Image: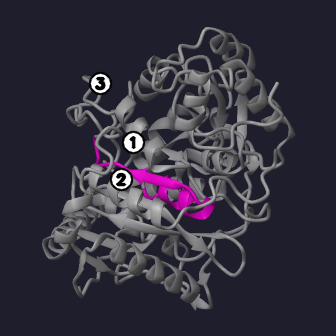
Amino acid sequence: MADKPWQGDMVSLVEAFRSGERHPREEVEATLAAVEASGINAVCHIDAEVALESAERADVALPFGGVPLGVKELLPVGGWPDTEGSLALVDRVAAQDSIVVSRLRASGAIPTVQTTSSEFGGVNQATTRLHGASRNPWGPDRTPGGSSGGSAGGVAGGLFTIATGSDGGGSIRIPAGFCGLVGLKPTYGRLPKGPGVSLGNITAVEGCLSRSIRDTARYLDATNGAHPRDPLSLPRVDGFEAGLGHHREDMGALRVAVVIDHGTAVVAPETEELVLAAAEELIAATGMRRVDMELRLPSVMGAWSLTGSIGLRKELGDRWPACADQLTSMMRRGVELAEKHLDLAALVIAETRRTELNEAMADMFEQADIVIAATNPSTAFDAEGRLPSVFGGRESDAGNNGALTTPSNIYGNPAISLPAGTASDGLPVGMQVLAPHHRESLLLDLGLVWEATHPWPLTAPSTPC
């Protein structure tokens, strides 16, 4: 048995399987042992017996052949707990795989562990009453972010090479930024949701947390494409991995704007400095033409949060309000506020805010082909307790934590978080790159240039295994 899980990226693990350097069962065994020994609490369910059996018959010729997969607990896997990270749903079990998990299985992946998230994916801190606090492998007192916190912590912590995520307000990009990983939020509809998933406020997308650009490209190849159970899913696009690098010669024609704070968020001075330096380095490496932009995106956090409670209330069904005391305080308060204030007038206001934001984003992309911003206002905050309201000495409110990422969820455009370096506290900082709808390939190519220019650690310096 290997002494620890593969510490390279996922694609190199598949190559090791194919060359005979590693065997899938050996990798699953190493993953299970590392999860058992880990103190970061990134995993809430282990499917050891099935994973080991699957590893024995893995077809390593497949794109994900034999790879142990971490699956975020908001993405159903048949026979696994389907709790949404909530005590209120602790008895619920998934009847079938989600579409994305089914496609990953068909590509050879082995769902092995379920990763922790925030309750119903509601906040960017993976701490729940059901599972406790998940921790960041770069600093165990800090959060890995949320809601895909366990996925990010496990990948950065060396437990498994790749994990699923979902992003309704930054829930892939935020933990990617906090944990030094690649986190792409695709165009809305690129990966189908379902079966049986509500569309909600039409912001949430599926994706992954990975260690490399090519891993993310291969994930898109395996999972994208329309499905009849998701009426808003997009037609299949082939060749994300095979096409890597194809935009390299055209980058000099791109207009790029650098607006670290989107003109509306409060960003810590050190984060701003690091992201600005990274942006300038990326622009120099690609030859993109920098343009100035006066940007002030309208605030949408209140409307986004209020309308997001619709899906949460639907999940609770007739358990509410008896289950109120089982919810974390923020989720309980969200449902209570929605019941009190979410009437026709509130929905009109929310739709007005969405329209204003969409118009502002369209104006932004008329002025620039690419926009670079920070992923998070600061480095990772405490793993437990309240969300911060002070960012590098600058005050704001708790909603500031997602203010940099939520606009791309409302508008539906793709955006990627790339590791920009580490701050003075030793924690990662993420650089967020935004592109217009359907331009994932361009974001991956920009990430590929950045990966070559500014290689990042594939795992945290002191991993738990």
Verify whether residue 179 appears in magenta: yes
Mark 2: few/some/many CA within 10 Å (<14, 14-19, 20+): many
In-front residue for pair 308/207? 207
- Where residue 320 appears, as percent x and y from the top left, is 56, 40
- Look at label 1 and name its amino acid: Ala
Image depth: mark 1 or mark 3 in front: 1
Crowd around label 3: few <14 · some 14–19 · many ≥20 (10 Å): some
Callouts 2 and 3 close, C-beta under 8 Å = no
The residue sitting at the right extreme is: 37
Q: Residue 390, relative to residue 359: is it above or below?
A: below
Q: Position of residue 409 (x, y in %)?
A: 34, 57
Q: Is residue 92 visible?
A: no
Name the quadrant of the C terminus.
top right
Is residue 395 at all visible to an observer of this figure? yes
Q: Which residue is mark 1?
A: 217
What amino acid does circle 3 point to?
Arg
Name the element at disc 2.
helix
> Is the residue marked by circle 1 packed among few (<14), some (14-19), or many (20+) residues within 10 Å?
many
Residue hosting label 2: 444
Please state the extent of the stretch shown in magenta in the rendering.
169-189
- Residue at 40 percent of width and 56 percent of height: 448
Instruction: Tell which circle, 1 or 3, labels the residue nearer the N-terminal end.
Output: 1
Vertical side of 234 occupied by 102: above or below: above
- Report, in whole angstroms, how far the alpha carbon at label 1 lies from the one at label 3: 24 Å
Q: Do the residues bearing badges 1 and 2 touch, measured as CB atoms within 8 Å?
A: yes
86 is within the stretch colored magenta: no
Mark 1–mark 2 distance (CA, rounded to whole Å): 7 Å
Which residue is tagged 3?
Answer: 229
Residue 359: x and y in percent read 16, 69
Specify the label residue 62 is tagged with. none
| 208 or 241, nearer to the observer | 241
Marks 1 and 3: CB-CB under 8 Å?
A: no
